[in-house]
Image (spheres, coloured by chain):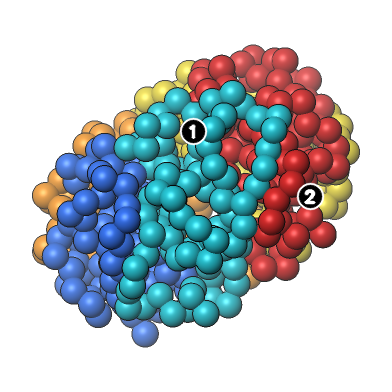
Chain colours: A yellow, B orange, C blue, D red, E cyan
């Protein structure tokens, strides 16, 4: 899973019908040393802006999230309370 | 999902027969800080050039899009109306 | 899908038996701004060296290509006739 | 699989119910020459901080790990005893 | 598939039981222009150190390799005899 920070959200009216009702959050995650990228993940755990989260990508984003039939490739699956070694991303 | 901007389209006459009828759009998306890449996504929502879109990649591009049997690994699944935190990509 | 240019081919005598009869082409594709990488894709549409092609990656490379049981993760699924927005990769 | 070093761990109370009981370790792995990135992998083999490990990503992280129904995209599947050619990552 | 060079091997005693008997080789492959990364692939074709190989990644690494139930995401599926366009990686 990726470690990321919730930095925003997206509104999409015209979208695939299987995505209706999904909440799209923008996640900033580390691409590599000193570099970041932003992806959009569906929120399944009620994460808020500014929180550090675990993001499952690929087919994992649909498994166990009751979204097996939706075109989703990234999902927030946990909110990080604390951790050692996450400083690089947190800062 | 990736946030991207529709920047062009592609015409392909000689192609896999399962792709006949698909509309191929070129999407510019952020690779990492200050860097971009272009991919081709099948359009399922009627996106036009210049619009900001959500792109599902991998197996997600075929699920819920009635394209389960086509060799597709990227699909436009939503048009972005507005959002907070998408400035990096929009600019 | 990725946009790429066919820049070469590969001969492999000792290989997985499910790959016997496959034609392996080397594709140059854009990794990110100003940077490229080369991958090997199985050719399903008769592409020649120098042509611009659409490459499906991941499980998409096996679906709809009658290669569901072969260890293939990239396939040429279309030859690009023309397009707007492909200049970066073409040059 | 990726070669990585276990550099930390993550605590997440509010998470997908299929992840309850999983141990989340932070892995530092090589992104490319001279550059690294950190991902979170579920530990299936009892790895400790500082150990070099093999990490399976994508659907492989759920297969053979009795986690087929959980939203997991990275798992530690082996602890590295020794090897030739791992210096770049170890240092 | 990726083109890579076998540059080493890895010994792992404590590992997922589905991996027992697998041979883990370290492959150096091109990440992008002028940059490389190392991954670990299971060897199915008897490749030796120094040889140029084709590596299948993702679910392709398990298909057609009699490893459908093991947590494997990269496999050597061919040894390259010769090719045009592989100079960048070979050098």
Q: Any mark on residue A86, and which?
A: none
Determine the CA span between mark 2 and mark 1.
Answer: 25 Å
Residue A89's disc is 2
Residue E84 picture location, percent across and down: 32, 78
Which one is in front in this view, the residue at disc 2 or the one at disc 1? 1
Q: Which chain does the numbered disc 2 sit on? A: A
| Towards the viewer: D81 or A13 | D81
In percent of the image, x 38 and y 59: which residue is there?
E79
Above or below, B26 against D9 in this view is: below
x, y (%) of residue A53?
72, 35
Mark 1 crowdedness (10 Å alpha carbons): few <14, some 14-19, many ≥20: many
Q: Give the quadrant of residue E17.
A: top right
Q: SS class of the residue under badge 1?
A: helix
Q: Residue at x 52, y 48 (%)?
A: E41
Q: Quadrant of the C terminus of chain B?
A: bottom right
Q: Is residue D66 above or below residue B50?
A: above
Residue C17 falls in which quadrant of the image?
top left
Q: At 43% across and 60% down in the image, what residue appears?
A: E53
Q: Residue C66 placed where, x, y %?
A: 17, 42
């Amino acid at each position: 899973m990726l470690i990321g920070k919730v930095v925003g959200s997206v509104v999409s009216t015209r979208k695939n019908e299987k995505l209706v009702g999904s909440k799209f959050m923008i996640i900033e995650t580390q691409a590599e040393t000193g570099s970041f990228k932003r992806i959009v993940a569906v929120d399944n755990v009620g994460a808020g802006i500014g929180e550090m989260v675990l993001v499952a990508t690929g087919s994992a984003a649909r498994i166990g999230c009751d979204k097996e039939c939706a075109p989703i490739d990234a999902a927030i699956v946990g909110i990080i309370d604390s951790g050692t070694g996450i400083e690089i991303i947190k800062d």
